[in-house]
């Protein structure tokens, strides 16, 4: 999973990334459900499948498994913290009552910032030939993660007994991985590959019309450099004009500079074939399929996986106008550039409208996190 994409902002981000276990401080204020704008209009019946999906995943984890979240959170940072709420789910007949009984809302004391990401649909072939000349690489066998002397996890490769950074985008584009049998599909354009890597997953449309999904399977560990920011710094695009469409258009109209510009982002994502149902989204970093309009990528150092979040923001409608959007979503993914309190990347699904919404979503608003109540809490049965 990623997992996650800031299309209308300067920073285009990868949809999924390796989880970050770093804890930090998050300022919260307890509030009531009656203070949530639009709460009474929510479609509560549609939430139950996502809740059950999360609880099934949590049940697979040892109780002490860290889910992430700031050290200042009162509860919900370990898988076992959710056991009572998940057990109660089995006998729930009224989702709204269940939520108000088993969860406590807390307003995040920071202005929220929302963006969107989606699953692109890209023409591809499983064999090289004709217009299909750009490889989609699987994870190389020599790509490893290990603990550095400072205790941080790092990505790289071993060479003659020394641990070195993994090859960057320019080296990989130059053919350093050729001959290893890593090619799992072929695309028509390096630009298609670049944006597939930004999203972290995508659907490939094969010549016979069938579709397969590419899922995230690691990255090279090189720093992520937002291409939108590069083009703004070079005075090629105005900051107000940065979007997926404007960046793609610039690349396609500057073929002589296309590769060199993309290679200024040394980060490179590898894929695997994901044979999960195409009726759902790709699997996010939490290990469950993403649900359009219900899954978000978050900063795991701030918010634990599985946490419900009440979102109050605006989404572009079919006419391109921002419209109020107030719904419950779930922390199921992470992204390279999804950092800080109140930051979330909404998974919008796949297809043209999902791409349009994700590409034009860059809004502020309010975020409220719903943490499970401890079993001893008198408000819980």
Image (cartoon, rainbow, N blue to C red):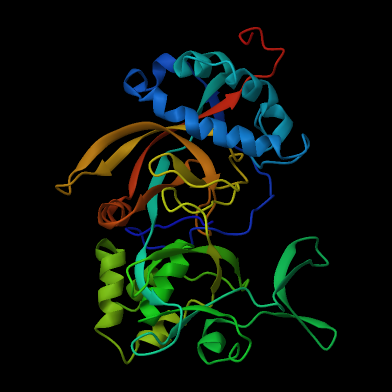
Q: Residue at x 33, y 53 (%)?
A: 358
Q: Which quarter of the image is occupied by the N terminus?
A: bottom right
Q: Quadrant of residue 186?
A: bottom left
Does the rendering let one see residue 238? Answer: no
**Would residue 170 appear left or right of 64 to someone viewing this image?**
left
In the image shown, does 274 or 294 lie closer to the viewer? 274
Vertical comparison of 188 with 108: above or below: below
Image location of residue 339, percent across then percent down? 53, 51
Vertical comparison of 194 with 75: above or below: below
The outermost residue toward the front is 208
Q: Residue at x 65, y 31 (%)?
A: 73
Task: Count numbered badges in the picture.
Answer: 0
The outermost residue toward the left is 319
Q: Residue at x 40, y 18 (%)?
A: 35
**Would residue 206 appear left or right of 150 to someone viewing this image?**
left
Q: Which quarter of the image is occupied by the C terminus?
A: top right
In the image shown, does 344 or 91 lie closer to the viewer? 91
Vertical comparison of 53 with 242: above or below: above
């Amino acid at each position: 999973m990623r997992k996650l994409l800031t299309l209308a902002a300067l920073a285009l981000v990868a949809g999924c990334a390796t989880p970050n276990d770093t804890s930090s401080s998050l300022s919260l204020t307890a509030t009531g459900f009656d203070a949530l704008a639009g709460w009474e209009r929510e479609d509560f019946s549609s939430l139950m499948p996502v809740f059950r999906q999360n609880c099934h995943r949590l049940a697979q984890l040892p109780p002490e498994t860290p889910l992430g979240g700031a050290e200042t959170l009162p509860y919900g940072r370990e898988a076992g913290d959710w056991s009572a709420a998940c057990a109660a789910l089995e006998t729930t007949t009224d989702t709204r009552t269940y939520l108000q009984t088993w969860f406590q809302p807390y307003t995040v004391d920071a202005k929220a910032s929302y963006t969107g990401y989606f699953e692109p649909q890209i023409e591809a072939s499983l064999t090289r030939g004709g217009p299909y000349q750009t490889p989609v690489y699987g994870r190389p066998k020599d790509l490893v993660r290990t603990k550095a002397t400072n205790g941080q996890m790092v990505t790289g490769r071993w060479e003659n007994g020394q641990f070195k950074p993994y090859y960057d985008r320019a080296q990989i584009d130059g053919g350093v991985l050729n001959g290893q049998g890593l090619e799992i599909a072929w695309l028509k354009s390096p630009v298609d590959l670049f944006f597939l890597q930004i999203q972290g997953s995508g659907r490939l449309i094969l010549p016979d019309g069938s579709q397969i999904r590419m899922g995230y399977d690691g990255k090279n560990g090189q720093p992520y450099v937002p291409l939108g920011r590069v083009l703004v710094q070079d005075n090629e695009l105005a900051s107000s004009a940065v979007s997926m469409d404007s960046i793609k258009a610039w690349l396609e109209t500057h073929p002589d500079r296309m590769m060199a510009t993309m290679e200024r982002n040394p980060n490179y994502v590898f894929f695997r074939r994901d044979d999960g149902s195409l009726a759902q989204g790709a699997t996010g970093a939490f290990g469950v399929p993403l649900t359009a309009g219900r899954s978000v990528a978050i900063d795991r150092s701030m918010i634990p996986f599985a946490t419900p979040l009440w979102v109050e923001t605006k989404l572009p409608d079919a006419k391109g106008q921002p419209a109020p959007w107030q719904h419950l979503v779930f922390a199921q993914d992470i992204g390279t550039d999804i950092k800080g309190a109140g930051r979330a990347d909404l998974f919008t699904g796949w297809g043209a409208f999902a791409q349009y919404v994700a590409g034009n979503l860059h809004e502020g608003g309010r975020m409220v996190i719903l943490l499970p109540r401890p079993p001893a809490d008198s408000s819980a049965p």
